Image (cartoon, grey):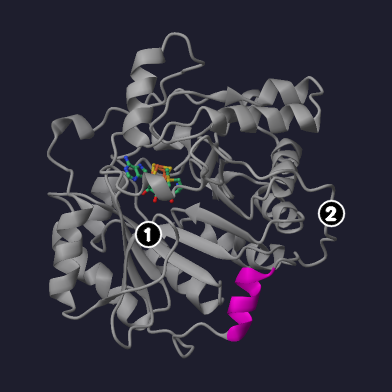
């Protein structure tokens, strides 16, 4: 077992539920910002409402996962191009007024950013924001865990693709398996309301470890999420064609691992979600490439350099950074989000098609890695 069995009962307590749902999540010592007027919700032309923003806070990372970014020669943008914390918090404040309830900080590796605790605290204190989550590779988590908890972080996704130390080095090009496992345990021990383990499903790499990962959900109050490999790997290994495994094939395996396992509740893109009888945790399968869940998408993405993206598969970007720096008003920022979502395609296949057709006319910079898009 990668992590020790849960010290708690393994079930969510009322208190944890309250924290996760709290419309009043409040960072310790952080006074909530005064609410401003609510704005109409952010919707697209298909009537979908968007209430969840994923904000990449850096493109940099202390790992070099082969499915995400190259080992060397990454052309990181200068610091002046990356949004500053007051700019990020202004965006969060405006989104809170537009009905956005959940913020996730991601990257690159969000914990390499020194002001990450302030970003969490500021977001948690923002009217309308009910949950603040973080996606991390876990290497620096122990350094910030208590401060993040105190700042109001309600959920942590920790990425881990193998339990084998040699394979960990092969996939991440760095040491650190022990630290990542310890971080998962720490997140559980500290009682973060939501703890998830992100596993990129890769044929020829971790298919023999799937049961080891799903077994984590037997005793631990966490969700193990298997994500389909997507072609945003900085031109590394996708093109070999050998690594993709479908969500459907994994769902079938899960049903054989735990006969009678039942569907459970999850987030909107965790369509395939299961919980075995008496299990403390859940198992989710995310069809990120086969895109069967696009209709349920409620995500807004903001890149580290301040562009809004309405879909992972779209190259269209809507710039906020210069508008903010040139004194743009809140109304002008709102209109960028509205335009971005008016132009959202029906699903990721349409978005991809539209992107390749319009590459020249749209503000496209052809991001090839998840660190640039914000995973
Ligand atoms: N550095 C942090 C981490 O690894 O958790 C946050 C950023 S990372 C880009 C966010 C998530 O995207 C991770 O769970 C990672 O495994 C996943 N990811 C990165 N590249 C991917 C790809 N090509 N296909 C599927 N998932 C990918
Ligand atoms: Fe870094 Fe996360 Fe990309 Fe791995 S997946 S290289 S940890 S940003």
Q: Is residue 286 magenta?
A: no
Residue named by callout 2: 33
* Disc nearest the viewer among 1 and 2: 1
Rendered location of residue 332, percent (x, y): 75, 26
* Mark 1 surroundings within 10 Å by alpha-carbon count, few (fewer than 14), some (14 through 19), many (20 or more): many
Compared with 75, 285 (above or below) is below
Residue named by callout 1: 270
Rendered location of residue 113, percent (x, y): 61, 44
Q: Secondary structure at mark 2?
A: loop
Please give the name of the residue rendered at 45% of the width and 61% of the height, measured from the top-left corner: 267
Compared with 240, 274 (above or below) is below
Magenta region, main secondary structure: helix
Name the foreground residue: 112 vs 41. 41
Query: Quick one: quadrant of the N terminus?
Result: bottom left
Q: Which mark is residue 330?
A: none
Compared with 123, 187 (above or below) is below
Please give the name of the residue rendered at 28% of the width and 27% of the height, measured from the top-left corner: 235
Q: Earlier in the sequence, mark 1 or mark 2?
A: 2
Q: Residue furthest bottom?
A: 9
Query: Quick one: quadrant of the C terminus?
Result: top left
Question: Horizontal placement of 33 versus 357: left or right?
Answer: right
Task: Residue 39: tell me if it is visible.
Answer: yes
Task: Residue 232: tell me if it is visible.
Answer: no
Q: Secondary structure at mark 1?
A: loop
Name the foreground residue: 74 vs 273. 273
Compared with 113, 222 (above or below) is below
Task: Give the distance between the C-alpha atoms of the residues marked 1 and 2, in whole angstroms.
Answer: 32 Å
Tag 1–tag 2 contact (CB < 8 Å): no
* Mark 2 surroundings within 10 Å by alpha-carbon count, few (fewer than 14), some (14 through 19), many (20 or more): few
Q: Residue furthest top?
A: 360
Q: Which residues are magenta?
A: 14-22
Please give the name of the residue rendered at 33% of the width and 75% of the height, measured from the top-left corner: 217
């Amino acid at each position: 077992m990668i992590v020790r069995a849960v010290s708690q009962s393994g079930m969510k307590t009322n208190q944890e539920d309250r924290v996760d749902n709290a419309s009043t999540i409040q960072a310790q010592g952080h006074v909530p910002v005064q609410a401003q007027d609510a704005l109409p919700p952010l919707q697209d032309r298909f009537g979908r409402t968007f209430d969840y923003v994923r904000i990449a806070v850096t493109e940099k990372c202390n790992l070099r996962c082969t499915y995400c970014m190259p080992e060397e020669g990454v052309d990181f943008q200068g610091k002046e191009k990356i949004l500053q914390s007051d700019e990020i918090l202004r965006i969060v404040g405006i989104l809170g007024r537009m009905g956005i309830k959940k913020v996730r900080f991601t990257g690159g590796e969000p914990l390499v950013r020194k002001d990450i605790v302030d970003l969490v605290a500021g977001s948690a204190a923002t009217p309308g924001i009910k949950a603040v989550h973080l996606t991390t590779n876990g290497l620096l988590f122990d350094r910030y865990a208590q401060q993040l908890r105190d700042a109001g972080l309600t959920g942590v996704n920790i990425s881990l693709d193998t339990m084998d130390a040699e394979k960990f080095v092969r996939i991440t090009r760095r040491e650190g398996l022990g630290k990542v496992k310890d971080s998962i345990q720490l997140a559980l021990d500290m009682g973060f309301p939501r703890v998830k383990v992100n596993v990129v499903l890769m044929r020829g790499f971790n298919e023999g470890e799937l049961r080891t990962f799903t077994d984590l959900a037997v005793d631990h109050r966490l969700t193990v999420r298997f994500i389909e490999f997507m072609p945003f790997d900085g031109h590394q290994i996708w093109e070999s064609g050998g690594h993709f495994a479908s969500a459907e094939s994994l769902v079938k395996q899960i049903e054989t691992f735990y006969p009678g396992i039942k569907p459970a509740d999850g987030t909107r893109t965790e369509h395939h979600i299961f919980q075995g009888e008496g299990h403390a945790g859940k198992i989710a399968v995310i069809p990120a490439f086969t895109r069967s869940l696009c209709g349920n998408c409620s995500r807004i993405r903001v890149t580290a350099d301040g562009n809004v993206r309405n879909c992972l598969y779209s190259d269209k970007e809507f710039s906020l950074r210069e508008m903010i720096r040139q004194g743009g008003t809140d109304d002008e920022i709102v209109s960028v989000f509205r335009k971005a979502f008016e132009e959202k395609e029906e699903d990721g296949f349409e978005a991809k098609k539209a992107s390749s057709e319009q590459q020249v006319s749209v503000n496209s910079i052809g991001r090839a890695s998840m660190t640039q898009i914000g995973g």
